[in-house]
Image (cartoon, coloured by chain):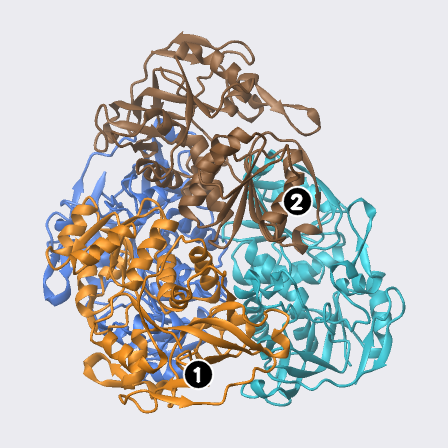
Chain colours: A brown, B cyan, C orange, D blue
Amino acid sequence: MKAIRIVRPKEPLEIQELETPKPQGSQVLVKVQSSGVCHSDIQLWDGGYRGPGGQFLKVTDRGIKYPLTPGHEVAGTIDSLGEDAKRFFIKNEKVVIYPWIGEGLCPACRGGEDNLCDKPRSLGVYRDGGYAEYVLVPNYRYIVKLDEDMDIDASATLSCSGLTAYRAIKNANLKPDDNVVIVGGTGGLGLMAIQLAKALTGAKVIAIGLHNNKLQAARKCGADAVVNSNKEDPTKAIMELTDKMGADAVIDFVNDSKTVEADMQFLRRRARLVLVGLFGGEVNLNLINIPARAYKLIGIDNGSIIDFIELISLASRRIVKPVVSNQFKLDQATEALTLLREGKIIGRSVINP
Amino acid sequence: MKAIRIVRPKEPLEIQELETPKPQGSQVLVKVQSSGVCHSDIQLWDGGYRGPGGQFLKVTDRGIKYPLTPGHEVAGTIDSLGEDAKRFFIKNEKVVIYPWIGEGLCPACRGGEDNLCDKPRSLGVYRDGGYAEYVLVPNYRYIVKLDEDMDIDASATLSCSGLTAYRAIKNANLKPDDNVVIVGGTGGLGLMAIQLAKALTGAKVIAIGLHNNKLQAARKCGADAVVNSNKEDPTKAIMELTDKMGADAVIDFVNDSKTVEADMQFLRRRARLVLVGLFGGEVNLNLINIPARAYKLIGIDNGSIIDFIELISLASRRIVKPVVSNQFKLDQATEALTLLREGKIIGRSVINP
Amino acid sequence: MKAIRIVRPKEPLEIQELETPKPQGSQVLVKVQSSGVCHSDIQLWDGGYRGPGGQFLKVTDRGIKYPLTPGHEVAGTIDSLGEDAKRFFIKNEKVVIYPWIGEGLCPACRGGEDNLCDKPRSLGVYRDGGYAEYVLVPNYRYIVKLDEDMDIDASATLSCSGLTAYRAIKNANLKPDDNVVIVGGTGGLGLMAIQLAKALTGAKVIAIGLHNNKLQAARKCGADAVVNSNKEDPTKAIMELTDKMGADAVIDFVNDSKTVEADMQFLRRRARLVLVGLFGGEVNLNLINIPARAYKLIGIDNGSIIDFIELISLASRRIVKPVVSNQFKLDQATEALTLLREGKIIGRSVINP
Amino acid sequence: MKAIRIVRPKEPLEIQELETPKPQGSQVLVKVQSSGVCHSDIQLWDGGYRGPGGQFLKVTDRGIKYPLTPGHEVAGTIDSLGEDAKRFFIKNEKVVIYPWIGEGLCPACRGGEDNLCDKPRSLGVYRDGGYAEYVLVPNYRYIVKLDEDMDIDASATLSCSGLTAYRAIKNANLKPDDNVVIVGGTGGLGLMAIQLAKALTGAKVIAIGLHNNKLQAARKCGADAVVNSNKEDPTKAIMELTDKMGADAVIDFVNDSKTVEADMQFLRRRARLVLVGLFGGEVNLNLINIPARAYKLIGIDNGSIIDFIELISLASRRIVKPVVSNQFKLDQATEALTLLREGKIIGRSVINP
């Protein structure tokens, strides 16, 4: 089979001809039809990222090995099944893969939250992923069926960008009388979060973004109000939109120094600040405010498989609709990553092997 | 009646002769027998505290007015009752007061959490409190009966130091297989938290403190392990005590720059960091870690009245035992506050009018 | 002021001229503009209801006294305010009343759930209610503001029929991949529950009713499927609609022997059966099934004041729309109750004093 | 290897010589050292049980097949490991097995609750269990390490009787000011539940049983009060012990017509009635009471693997201590089951192959 792999950090990805795996026991081989291209793939390609103080944090230090086939947002069809998996699936069934596979023995895994495993074994990160013609899934538990009429590219993106947005909404613990501010509400995750908040919570949704045309998209997804932080002071705008009470919850999909500093200015007492983005940086936190104002800061790293099932159910009934903007061939993976890094991708792009 | 009041910030408190209030409607007049002396009373006396960047934050800016009778940890007996309160209590009944009174109309109050009110009206803070012979309580809802054999001084301290410790334990969401690190585990709140964790959660408890003799007290309260952070590196010690996994939860009753920076070094993935103390300062937070390691930071500001009822029930059955170390007369209030500020009070002191 | 009162059970209600109350302390006097007519008002009028084994259970045995002004779904305007209430409201403000007032000292009240008080003091049940020109509310806490453009009759019905439906939906604990069966889905509570399930949960909604024209209304409110239990076997229909898995949750707004026996036939393992209706009767429960199939049976008696606030927020934004069908004058109360008892009211009727 | 198997319902179990399984992939072979003897094994032996109306419900109708090696409470040592399991365990490690294995794809399994699977595959029930020298476990996920100093027999019984008691306590949702009544509080599950309630909840515990000597055991486990229902009316006794309020929660480990009818007489408003026992029968439920008094009835069928981990942690620290009374050899299994059926086993018995 063909796979496009990171052989060494920062060098162009290489197409390699690998032996097609044969599934044993509970394993499943999926023929890849669509594999999403994620910002975190760029970190794998770069071999790490800048941490606090500017030092470079290598991904090999947390157990990632090269050569690696990236790709953790994978949808396709069943190709073949290990003996123990045959009861559950048949060849050619349309499926999507839950990629946030854990080792299985830590408290997170045992509680059904593989995504928070102490020693993660995620697909496309710690084991070969979906930038390939086939991908081997270690257990049928991680396979979820798709309805025949679901869009394969949109479904693929549910595994990471959709799932993270869903988990963020769940953790914001929104009630119908709350307002929620979505920071970075015009990216793929933000637009999904707006749709989910409207479909599931009854809360009032305010989106903050940088460009009017993108904020139009936020409005179409259901935002009750939008704030262009290039044109107006977000704190002032949020205080006005909330009768001077501040935000009951903020979900920050950027999570850099600048946005989090701003967030802290418009939180209502008792507010939840949900931090998602991996842009990073540091923030200087006024410690007395955390207890005195009873804030909660909540970090989100993907969702559990039960979250994933719920999200797919919503997508199958068109209650939420992920936006896919660009499609690439397998041998265009380097190009896809380069365009993403340069900010030239609007929404989510996918690779169709 | 006699009351000892802060007339102007930083000046000695003055004994004043005030008219004894007459309770109307749902109001209740309580004859004070014990009133706890709290660190936050010093902030009222000072007129404010140092915030981030060293600026002085005045308490009058958040609505506090002088002269003020401080004292929010108040136990005593029923003196007299408004017409609507007569069904519920009788003269001379032994009671303790829930002091974290809210305005009543914000979502927190309506959800039973007056302590998190948008516009708090707390006793001894926003209205006259327990450094007096009598205190007027605006509604019988805030009065809780005590068993005849309960110690009046120990019961008084449940209203703030006990209640905050209880709420912190609840929010740490401890499971029997978890370990929890209590930072500042040798103060009044810390010792109460250790007792509560042992009585209610099944978790393993590690106390961090600065003095061996105080750490002995932590052990007596049930700590499974203690760490003297003057003598050993807390991160190294915690990692060893937790099989290199780190803490599932940390409750930091100090909450200053130094302790929180240390806390961040020994959190396990998925950890809850519960911040309680009002010592303040700032911490430089590595933002990418919050989502990547799925941390939760949770600020605690006292507890609800239902928390209070539960705690009193535990105390009435001797399941937890607050430690009271010093007793003062009403006219010694200035002395009591001075000794507390100078760090000469071990545990909690009370005023007995 | 005029009030129409039950003087003796089963006799026509009498219009009486009573002294208009003067609010003291925290009390508020509301000028009634709309007061809903509820099935439970008929129990007050009858003086009781048939319990198991057919014996007549008198309401006076649980503390209800005559003469009584019924009416617990009350909306109107502020007429006058006790001294302590003046900070919060002004004359002529449009408001709705939370009627499920508790005594204030039981664990339910202290946890913010007056509706579950050990010794309830509900408006229109244990104290005079809204079938009158004015109603006295014992504390401003129970008053909620309405937006000027909200319909007064529809708003009144939120206090009981809307609130109960909302609480039922909350307790069904619905996830997006669940299905929920609404039994009695064509009455006022059922139609509200369908709207709420669609607006807040992502679950698939199946309504069971007896008449095709009413089931059309359920479809308009958002039901994904409807079952006419006069024409088809509900168990067979539900099993087909759920891929033979059964219902993840059932909310039964009838709650009589026949419906609950049927419910037990189509529950999925782990299902929640939420029982709401007061029609009563008995059911023979197979005890081994409760643990073996891990069922939960959950009884709902109105909602808390925070539930009420959330529901009003949804109604103010037209996310849910209660249906009011008939309007009566104050002196037509006997007629309104008679028509309701005879099943001649479709939806909810109100009295406009 | 030797296994003692049910070949045909009701006939004596047969010792058979079977081929010792060889673990593949993620499988693990455990050498059995202790296997608990459970009441539900008698149902397997009988081929079914009496349901409502007296009809005999065959276990083959829910997918159980003969010959079957029973035994779902299994502790022992690692014998050999499939390739994928070798990273996690080594030969001779002391372990206990989580037996409530699910198929893996239903919402319960995906949420970490295999015990509530739509199509269970439990060890010793749907697949061969621990009445044998070796048992094959389909995935290393279901293996939990034991400390070297833990008693092997006591540890085995945690898998079912301990786990069920733990789950029941969790679902009773006990607060420190609550009281809880344990019905059947003198059996193995009841005594474990009393220990757990005392160690984890702060609630007051009342045990109901039939014999004074067994009620002494309940007191030793920590019960605050005991009621001998042979000698006094339980309703009267519970009302007296609870200041006439009734029980905040009841956990009924008998769950037959007589006990549940009694339970319904002493529930406080808002009470949780947790039903566990499989003795069965029927109860006539007064439907109006469920909503009017806001009751919850909750069925418990074992616990999840994360519950199991937590319970083992408690047992490893001697916070709870299961009682094992009788030990049998493998060829005495028929005798062990016969004695259990005849009520001659006090506490739990185990088979040591």
Q: Position of residue C234 (x, y in %)?
A: 15, 56
Between B261 and C277, the one nearer to me in the picture: C277
Q: Are marks 1 and 2 in contact (CB under 8 Å)?
A: no
Residue C302 is marked as: none
Mark 1, Cα crowd under 10 Å, few <14 / some 14-19 / many 20+, is: many
Quarter of image, res A154: top left
Answer with left or right where residue D10 lies relative to residue C276.
left
Callout 2 secondary element: helix
Q: Residue D156, relative to residue D233: is it above or below? A: above
User: Which percent across, then down, holds residue B117?
Assistant: 61, 62
Residue, disc 1: C127
Q: Name the residue that disc number 2 marks.
A: A236
Which chain does the numbered disc 1 sit on?
Answer: C
- When the figure is inspected, residue B246 is found, relative to residue A147, above or below; the finding is below
Q: Residue at x 56, y 70 (%)?
A: B314
Q: Nearer the viewer, mark 1 or mark 2?
A: 2
